[in-house]
Image (tube, rainbow, N blue to C red):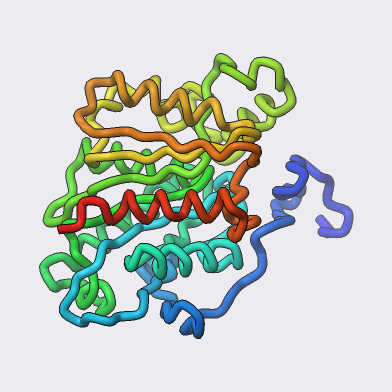
Amino acid sequence: MDSATAAIVLDFPLFLRLYSDGRVERFSGTDVVPTSTNPVTGVRSKDIVIDTNTDLSARLFVPKITNPNQKLPLVIYFHGGGFCIETAVSPQYHNYADSLAAEANAVVLSVNYRRAPEHPLPIAYNDSWAAIQWVASHSTNGGPEVWLKDYVDFNRIFFAGDSAGANIAHNMGIRVGSEGLNRVRIVGIVLFHPYFGGKEPIGGEIGNVKGKSFSDKLWMFAYPSSSGSDDPMMNPAMDPGLSGLGCEKVLVCVAERDFLRDRGWYYKEELGKSGWGGVVEIMEAVGEDHVFHLLNPTCDNAVAMLKRVVAFINEDKA
């Protein structure tokens, strides 16, 4: 079929459009920022290939090193975009990882997992787990990446992500709890505006039929073999293994005007009463919408949230 005459099969405004010939048109997250040394922060970045068979890659950020003998925490970051758009090298994700590395004095590994619909879930989950295992392989001075071997304290690893990336971060924590991860310690997980759902609407979802429909539809688009919005990967409250989350603490960040706000609060409550032995905290940004900190990183609420995340990463520092 001529691509010029292909019919639109599915249309997600501001996200992407799928055509009958299989072509995917993405409306966001297509720009690429090159690696560099930031002259202001001193943060260095480079792209690395984790698996040549799947083209799994990541962008690695290292802060300005003032003490070469000091080992730093590592944040493994999973970008958002509904599992469909954006990449680790998109401007907003490159810039945020740079800022996080500088402010937290931490190494940041931003994972470039494969995206739906060309690579439907659970591929992004499996890619993310492969990246985590690849990181862990460096803990005994193995593995090929010198920045990880030289700078990372493998007893101070964190997962973080926004929106769909927060969903991935949580599910990676569940996988650590169920499968284990040798030779490394996952201290905490930071969830920015997590993309969770459920069959029954809660809170603000009840009066927002359009928003709820979009959320449910996007999930099934990204994960067509899923059981639906109550799949434990989407609705952690339905996961009998929630109490086994494989970290010691969680910080949930929500925004007052975000459609997903109530899901973040619900997650916090369900995790807290699940029997999990860790500490879960929540921070709400008043007057803000979804991923505002990526779109306006210098606003007061974004600065305050970054400071809270930095404290979360460094509060257990020896």
Please give left or right for residue 187 compared with residue 261 in the image: left
Q: Percent x, y for residue 316?
A: 21, 51
| Residue appearing at x 62%, y 42% in the figure | 290
Please give left or right for residue 187 compared with residue 255 in the image: left
Q: Percent x, y for residue 172?
A: 33, 44
Residue 283 or residue 242, whichever sits in front:
283
Residue 132 or residue 92, whichever sits in front:
92
Residue 231 in view in this figure: no
Q: Quadrant of the N terminus?
A: bottom right
Residue 102 in view in this figure: yes
Q: In which quarter of the view is residue 221 placed?
A: top right
| Residue appearing at x 70%, y 54% in the figure | 24
Please give left or right for residue 190 compared with residue 201 in the image: left
| Residue appearing at x 59%, y 56% in the figure | 294
Q: In which quarter of the view is residue 86 placed?
A: bottom right
Q: Residue furthest right?
A: 5
Q: Quadrant of the C terminus?
A: bottom left
| Residue appearing at x 22%, y 38% in the figure | 177
Q: In which quarter of the view is residue 262 placed?
A: top right
